[in-house]
Protein backbone atom coordinates (compact mmCIF):
# COMPACT_ATOMS: atom_id res chain seq x y z
CA UNK A 1 0.00 0.00 0.00
CA UNK A 2 1.45 3.46 -0.91
CA UNK A 3 1.61 6.30 1.61
CA UNK A 4 -1.25 8.15 -0.12
CA UNK A 5 -3.46 5.11 0.11
CA UNK A 6 -2.56 4.63 3.75
CA UNK A 7 -3.51 8.24 4.51
CA UNK A 8 -6.82 7.89 2.62
CA UNK A 9 -7.51 4.60 4.40
CA UNK A 10 -6.80 6.09 7.85
CA UNK A 11 -8.72 9.31 7.26
CA UNK A 12 -11.79 7.43 6.04
CA UNK A 13 -11.64 5.11 9.06
CA UNK A 14 -11.41 8.10 11.39
CA UNK A 15 -14.34 9.80 9.59
CA UNK A 16 -16.49 6.67 9.99
CA UNK A 17 -15.50 6.30 13.63
CA UNK A 18 -16.35 9.95 14.44
CA UNK A 19 -19.68 9.85 12.58
CA UNK A 20 -20.90 6.56 14.01
CA UNK A 21 -19.80 7.69 17.43
CA UNK A 22 -22.03 10.78 17.14
CA UNK A 23 -25.09 8.98 15.78
CA UNK A 24 -24.96 5.75 17.84
CA UNK A 25 -28.06 6.48 19.95
CA UNK A 26 -30.16 7.64 16.99
CA UNK A 27 -28.87 4.75 14.87
CA UNK A 28 -30.16 2.39 17.51
CA UNK A 29 -33.62 3.99 17.55
CA UNK A 30 -34.06 4.67 13.84
CA UNK A 31 -31.87 2.43 11.66
CA UNK A 32 -31.31 -0.78 13.59
CA UNK A 33 -35.07 -1.40 13.26
CA UNK A 34 -34.58 -1.28 9.46
CA UNK A 35 -31.41 -3.39 9.28
CA UNK A 36 -32.94 -5.96 11.66
CA UNK A 37 -35.49 -6.95 9.04
CA UNK A 38 -32.90 -9.27 7.47
CA UNK A 39 -31.38 -10.63 10.70
CA UNK A 40 -33.19 -13.98 10.62
CA UNK A 41 -32.15 -14.55 6.98
CA UNK A 42 -28.50 -13.87 7.90
CA UNK A 43 -28.67 -16.24 10.86
CA UNK A 44 -30.35 -18.94 8.74
CA UNK A 45 -27.57 -18.56 6.14
CA UNK A 46 -24.86 -19.45 8.69
CA UNK A 47 -26.97 -22.13 10.41
CA UNK A 48 -27.15 -20.23 13.72
CA UNK A 49 -28.44 -22.54 16.43
CA UNK A 50 -27.98 -23.48 20.07
CA UNK A 51 -24.29 -23.73 21.08
CA UNK A 52 -22.87 -22.35 17.77
CA UNK A 53 -19.91 -19.99 18.35
CA UNK A 54 -20.82 -16.91 16.31
CA UNK A 55 -18.94 -13.64 15.75
CA UNK A 56 -20.94 -10.51 14.77
CA UNK A 57 -18.49 -8.12 13.04
CA UNK A 58 -19.47 -4.41 12.98
CA UNK A 59 -22.24 -5.37 15.41
CA UNK A 60 -23.41 -1.76 15.88
CA UNK A 61 -25.86 -1.60 18.78
CA UNK A 62 -26.18 -5.38 18.83
CA UNK A 63 -29.55 -6.26 17.29
CA UNK A 64 -28.17 -9.13 15.17
CA UNK A 65 -26.20 -10.41 18.17
CA UNK A 66 -29.42 -10.31 20.22
CA UNK A 67 -31.27 -12.32 17.54
CA UNK A 68 -28.45 -14.91 17.58
CA UNK A 69 -28.70 -15.10 21.38
CA UNK A 70 -32.41 -15.88 21.04
CA UNK A 71 -31.30 -18.96 19.07
CA UNK A 72 -29.00 -19.77 22.02
CA UNK A 73 -25.82 -19.27 19.98
CA UNK A 74 -22.65 -18.33 21.91
CA UNK A 75 -22.24 -14.77 20.68
CA UNK A 76 -19.25 -12.43 20.41
CA UNK A 77 -19.81 -8.96 18.92
CA UNK A 78 -17.19 -6.48 17.70
CA UNK A 79 -17.45 -2.86 16.58
CA UNK A 80 -14.96 -0.07 15.95
CA UNK A 81 -17.04 2.52 17.81
CA UNK A 82 -17.16 2.51 21.61
CA UNK A 83 -20.57 4.23 21.75
CA UNK A 84 -22.05 1.43 19.63
CA UNK A 85 -20.48 -1.28 21.81
CA UNK A 86 -21.71 0.49 24.96
CA UNK A 87 -25.32 0.19 23.74
CA UNK A 88 -24.85 -3.40 22.54
CA UNK A 89 -23.73 -4.34 26.05
CA UNK A 90 -27.36 -4.18 27.21
CA UNK A 91 -27.27 -7.88 26.17
CA UNK A 92 -25.14 -9.26 29.01
CA UNK A 93 -25.16 -12.83 27.65
CA UNK A 94 -22.94 -11.84 24.70
CA UNK A 95 -19.31 -10.77 24.89
CA UNK A 96 -18.72 -7.43 23.13
CA UNK A 97 -15.39 -5.97 22.02
CA UNK A 98 -14.21 -2.64 20.67
CA UNK A 99 -12.02 -3.47 17.64
CA UNK A 100 -11.34 -3.30 13.93
CA UNK A 101 -12.90 -5.66 11.37
CA UNK A 102 -9.66 -5.43 9.37
CA UNK A 103 -7.56 -6.64 12.29
CA UNK A 104 -9.70 -8.95 14.42
CA UNK A 105 -8.42 -9.45 17.98
CA UNK A 106 -9.23 -13.17 17.95
CA UNK A 107 -7.31 -16.44 17.51
CA UNK A 108 -7.58 -18.23 14.17
CA UNK A 109 -10.31 -20.88 13.82
CA UNK A 110 -12.20 -19.70 16.91
CA UNK A 111 -15.73 -19.30 15.50
CA UNK A 112 -18.18 -21.59 13.71
CA UNK A 113 -19.97 -18.68 12.05
CA UNK A 114 -19.08 -15.06 11.27
CA UNK A 115 -21.74 -12.51 10.26
CA UNK A 116 -21.40 -8.88 9.21
CA UNK A 117 -24.57 -6.95 8.46
CA UNK A 118 -24.10 -3.70 6.53
CA UNK A 119 -20.54 -3.34 7.77
CA UNK A 120 -18.57 -4.21 4.63
CA UNK A 121 -19.35 -0.91 2.86
CA UNK A 122 -17.77 0.95 5.78
CA UNK A 123 -14.37 -0.78 5.66
CA UNK A 124 -11.69 0.99 3.60
CA UNK A 125 -10.08 -2.40 2.89
CA UNK A 126 -12.98 -4.87 2.64
CA UNK A 127 -10.74 -7.63 1.22
CA UNK A 128 -8.72 -7.51 4.43
CA UNK A 129 -11.91 -7.69 6.52
CA UNK A 130 -13.10 -10.74 4.53
CA UNK A 131 -9.66 -12.38 4.95
CA UNK A 132 -9.79 -11.73 8.69
CA UNK A 133 -13.25 -13.32 8.94
CA UNK A 134 -11.93 -16.32 6.99
CA UNK A 135 -8.99 -16.60 9.41
CA UNK A 136 -11.07 -16.61 12.61
CA UNK A 137 -13.57 -19.13 11.17
CA UNK A 138 -13.10 -22.80 11.92
CA UNK A 139 -12.96 -25.04 8.81
CA UNK A 140 -16.54 -26.08 8.10
CA UNK A 141 -17.86 -22.68 9.25
CA UNK A 142 -19.90 -20.16 7.28
CA UNK A 143 -19.49 -16.42 6.72
CA UNK A 144 -22.34 -14.10 5.70
CA UNK A 145 -22.35 -10.37 4.98
CA UNK A 146 -24.92 -7.92 3.62
CA UNK A 147 -24.60 -4.69 1.64
CA UNK A 148 -27.15 -2.21 0.25
CA UNK A 149 -28.08 -2.79 -3.40
CA UNK A 150 -27.45 0.17 -5.76
CA UNK A 151 -30.07 2.85 -6.51
CA UNK A 152 -30.99 1.11 -9.79
CA UNK A 153 -32.79 -1.58 -7.78
CA UNK A 154 -33.20 0.20 -4.44
CA UNK A 155 -35.95 2.87 -4.37
CA UNK A 156 -34.85 4.28 -1.00
CA UNK A 157 -31.26 4.88 -2.15
CA UNK A 158 -32.54 6.16 -5.51
CA UNK A 159 -34.72 8.73 -3.72
CA UNK A 160 -32.00 10.04 -1.39
CA UNK A 161 -29.05 10.04 -3.80
CA UNK A 162 -31.15 10.96 -6.85
CA UNK A 163 -32.43 14.06 -5.00
CA UNK A 164 -28.86 15.06 -4.12
CA UNK A 165 -27.68 14.51 -7.70
CA UNK A 166 -30.57 16.59 -9.10
CA UNK A 167 -30.70 19.45 -6.59
CA UNK A 168 -27.36 19.38 -4.77
CA UNK A 169 -23.79 18.23 -5.14
CA UNK A 170 -21.89 15.00 -4.61
CA UNK A 171 -18.61 16.89 -5.06
CA UNK A 172 -17.94 17.32 -1.34
CA UNK A 173 -14.85 17.53 0.80
CA UNK A 174 -15.15 14.04 2.30
CA UNK A 175 -12.32 11.57 2.86
CA UNK A 176 -12.29 9.17 -0.10
CA UNK A 177 -14.08 5.98 0.88
CA UNK A 178 -14.91 2.63 -0.71
CA UNK A 179 -17.87 2.62 -3.16
CA UNK A 180 -21.12 2.45 -1.17
CA UNK A 181 -22.72 -0.17 -3.40
CA UNK A 182 -19.77 -2.32 -4.53
CA UNK A 183 -21.05 -5.38 -2.67
CA UNK A 184 -24.63 -4.74 -3.71
CA UNK A 185 -23.48 -6.35 -7.00
CA UNK A 186 -23.68 -10.13 -7.13
CA UNK A 187 -20.43 -10.58 -9.12
CA UNK A 188 -18.37 -8.47 -6.70
CA UNK A 189 -19.60 -10.51 -3.72
CA UNK A 190 -18.76 -13.78 -5.48
CA UNK A 191 -15.31 -12.61 -6.61
CA UNK A 192 -14.32 -11.24 -3.20
CA UNK A 193 -15.41 -14.34 -1.28
CA UNK A 194 -13.79 -16.80 -3.70
CA UNK A 195 -10.54 -14.75 -3.74
CA UNK A 196 -10.21 -15.18 0.04
CA UNK A 197 -10.75 -18.96 -0.10
CA UNK A 198 -14.49 -19.38 0.46
CA UNK A 199 -16.40 -22.07 -1.48
CA UNK A 200 -20.14 -22.84 -1.91
CA UNK A 201 -20.67 -19.10 -2.41
CA UNK A 202 -24.27 -17.89 -2.77
CA UNK A 203 -25.66 -14.38 -3.20
CA UNK A 204 -29.33 -13.51 -2.63
CA UNK A 205 -31.22 -10.21 -2.75
CA UNK A 206 -33.40 -9.59 0.32
CA UNK A 207 -36.17 -6.95 0.38
CA UNK A 208 -36.72 -4.60 3.30
CA UNK A 209 -38.48 -1.28 3.98
CA UNK A 210 -37.28 2.00 5.44
CA UNK A 211 -40.12 3.21 7.65
CA UNK A 212 -40.91 6.79 8.67
CA UNK A 213 -43.85 8.50 10.41
CA UNK A 214 -44.37 11.09 7.64
CA UNK A 215 -42.62 12.10 4.36
CA UNK A 216 -41.33 15.15 6.26
CA UNK A 217 -39.32 12.93 8.64
CA UNK A 218 -37.26 11.15 6.01
CA UNK A 219 -34.40 13.57 5.47
CA UNK A 220 -34.04 14.60 9.13
CA UNK A 221 -33.93 10.97 10.23
CA UNK A 222 -31.26 10.06 7.68
CA UNK A 223 -29.14 13.10 8.63
CA UNK A 224 -29.08 12.34 12.36
CA UNK A 225 -28.72 8.57 12.27
CA UNK A 226 -26.39 7.58 9.41
CA UNK A 227 -22.70 8.22 8.66
CA UNK A 228 -21.89 8.88 4.99
CA UNK A 229 -25.45 9.40 3.68
CA UNK A 230 -26.27 11.81 6.50
CA UNK A 231 -23.04 13.72 5.97
CA UNK A 232 -23.68 14.06 2.22
CA UNK A 233 -27.08 15.59 3.03
CA UNK A 234 -25.76 17.79 5.83
CA UNK A 235 -22.97 19.28 3.68
CA UNK A 236 -25.27 20.87 1.07
CA UNK A 237 -25.81 24.66 0.93
CA UNK A 238 -29.05 25.90 2.58
CA UNK A 239 -30.71 26.35 -0.82
CA UNK A 240 -29.64 22.92 -2.07
CA UNK A 241 -30.80 21.44 1.23
CA UNK A 242 -34.28 23.01 0.86
CA UNK A 243 -34.65 21.70 -2.70
CA UNK A 244 -33.37 18.23 -1.78
CA UNK A 245 -35.76 18.08 1.18
CA UNK A 246 -38.73 19.02 -1.02
CA UNK A 247 -37.74 16.38 -3.59
CA UNK A 248 -37.45 13.74 -0.86
CA UNK A 249 -40.84 14.73 0.62
CA UNK A 250 -42.38 14.52 -2.84
CA UNK A 251 -40.85 11.11 -3.59
CA UNK A 252 -41.59 9.70 -0.13
CA UNK A 253 -45.26 10.73 -0.36
CA UNK A 254 -45.71 8.08 -3.05
CA UNK A 255 -44.93 5.43 -0.43
CA UNK A 256 -47.40 6.68 2.21
CA UNK A 257 -49.48 3.96 3.90
CA UNK A 258 -52.22 4.10 6.55
CA UNK A 259 -49.59 3.86 9.27
CA UNK A 260 -46.77 6.03 7.89
CA UNK A 261 -44.29 5.82 5.02
CA UNK A 262 -42.63 2.58 3.85
CA UNK A 263 -39.96 3.03 1.21
CA UNK A 264 -38.73 -0.23 -0.34
CA UNK A 265 -35.04 -1.08 -0.38
CA UNK A 266 -32.96 -4.23 -0.49
CA UNK A 267 -29.65 -5.74 0.51
CA UNK A 268 -27.47 -8.41 -1.07
CA UNK A 269 -26.77 -11.32 1.26
CA UNK A 270 -23.46 -13.05 0.38
CA UNK A 271 -22.55 -16.35 2.00
CA UNK A 272 -19.40 -18.50 1.84
CA UNK A 273 -18.17 -21.76 3.36
CA UNK A 274 -14.67 -22.28 4.77
CA UNK A 275 -13.49 -25.70 3.54
C1 LIG B 1 -24.53 0.48 9.26
S1 LIG B 1 -23.83 0.04 10.78
C2 LIG B 1 -24.34 -1.68 10.90
C3 LIG B 1 -24.54 -2.10 12.34
C4 LIG B 1 -25.25 -3.44 12.53
N1 LIG B 1 -24.49 -4.54 11.98
C5 LIG B 1 -26.63 -3.41 11.96
O1 LIG B 1 -26.91 -4.19 11.04
O2 LIG B 1 -27.45 -2.59 12.41
C6 LIG B 1 -22.13 -0.11 10.43
C7 LIG B 1 -21.29 -0.41 11.67
O3 LIG B 1 -19.94 -0.66 11.24
C8 LIG B 1 -19.07 -0.19 12.26
N2 LIG B 1 -17.73 -0.07 11.68
C9 LIG B 1 -17.29 0.81 10.74
N3 LIG B 1 -16.01 0.57 10.45
C10 LIG B 1 -15.62 -0.50 11.21
C11 LIG B 1 -14.41 -1.24 11.35
N4 LIG B 1 -13.32 -0.91 10.63
N5 LIG B 1 -14.40 -2.29 12.18
C12 LIG B 1 -15.49 -2.62 12.91
N6 LIG B 1 -16.65 -1.95 12.84
C13 LIG B 1 -16.73 -0.91 11.99
C14 LIG B 1 -19.72 1.12 12.67
O4 LIG B 1 -19.26 1.57 13.91
C15 LIG B 1 -21.20 0.73 12.67
O5 LIG B 1 -21.59 0.28 13.93
Image (tube, rainbow, N blue to C red):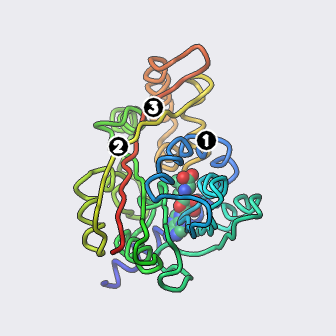
Q: Residue at the location (52% across, 34% down)?
A: 210
Location of residue 266 with respect to 180 vertically, above or below: above
**What's the mark number on residue 205?**
2
Q: Is residue 14 visible?
A: no
> Which label's residue is closer to the chain start, 2 or 3?
2
Location of residue 108 with respect to 80 vertically, above or below: below
**Badge count:** 3
Depth order, front residue of 137/8:
137
Q: CA distance from mark 2 to mark 3?
A: 29 Å
Depth order, front residue of 120/198:
198
**Of the two numbered discs 2 and 3 in the rendering, the one whose residue sits closer to the viewer:** 2
* Residue annotated with mark 3: 244
In the picture, measured across the screen, residue 152 lies left or right of residue 103, that is left
Residue 124 x %, y %: 40, 69
Write down the quadrant of residue 219 in the picture: top right
For label 2, being within 8 Å of ligand 1 is answered: no
Q: Residue at the location (27% across, 51% down)?
A: 185
What element does badge 1 sit on? Answer: helix
Amino acid sequence: MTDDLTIAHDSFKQFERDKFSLVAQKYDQAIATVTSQVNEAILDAVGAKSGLRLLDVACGTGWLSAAALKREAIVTGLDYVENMVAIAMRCPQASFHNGDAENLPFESGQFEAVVCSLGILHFPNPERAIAESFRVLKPGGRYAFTCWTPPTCNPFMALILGSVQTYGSMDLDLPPGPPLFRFGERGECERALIAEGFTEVSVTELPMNWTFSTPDDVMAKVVVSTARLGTILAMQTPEQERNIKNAIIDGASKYATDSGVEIPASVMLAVGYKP
